Image: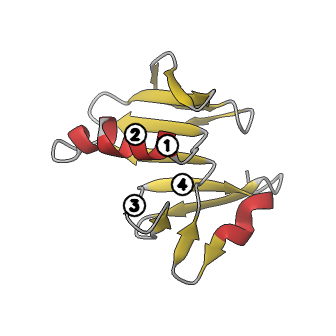
Amino acid sequence: MRKHNLGKVFIAPLDVHFSKENILQPDIFFIKTENIRKIKSRGLFGAPDFIVEILSTATSHLDFGEKKLIYEKYGVRGYFIVEPNSNSVTSFLLKNKKYEEQKKTKGIIKSILLHTEIRF
């Protein structure tokens, strides 16, 4: 991503202000170069281009529930949930303002947005 100047990756803690009521700190998020202006001193104001959440037992209900609904509502184009114990990735792609679950992968985040794969 850096090599091609596609944008910037940010890691928590950094606030993402979707609205006054919805301020979250995704584990990892990406902003395309043309959207960098959304970054201010207090965080990101608006939706990132994609988000990665690292699943934990304590937060899994939020990642698959409330957070997913907020990310979908505010237009996060790609949402990836990584399950560290199994290295599996559940991914959602925003189509017609609704998330469509993509094929589950192991150890790979496939970003249609960036036309790339991120292996871990």
Find the distance from the CA under tag 4 to the CA under tag 1: 17 Å
Nearer the N terminus, badge 2 or badge 4?
Answer: 4
Nearer the N terminus, badge 4 or badge 1?
Answer: 4
Find the distance from the CA under tag 3 to the CA under tag 2: 11 Å
Give me the residue at 71% from left, 36% from top.
113
Residue 20 percent coordinates (x, y): 43, 69
Residue, disc 4: 29
Find the distance from the CA under tag 4 to the CA under tag 3: 16 Å
Question: Looking at the image, is 111 positioned above or below residue 52?
Answer: above
Q: Which mark is residue 73?
A: 1
- Badge 1, how many Cα within 10 Å: few under 14, some, many 20+? some
- Disc 4 marks which amino acid? Phe
- Badge 2, how many Cα within 10 Å: few under 14, some, many 20+? some
Residue 82 percent coordinates (x, y): 39, 37
Give me the residue at 54% from left, 54% from top.
29
Find the distance from the CA under tag 2 to the CA under tag 4: 16 Å
Residue, disc 3: 22
Nearer the N terminus, badge 4 or badge 3?
Answer: 3
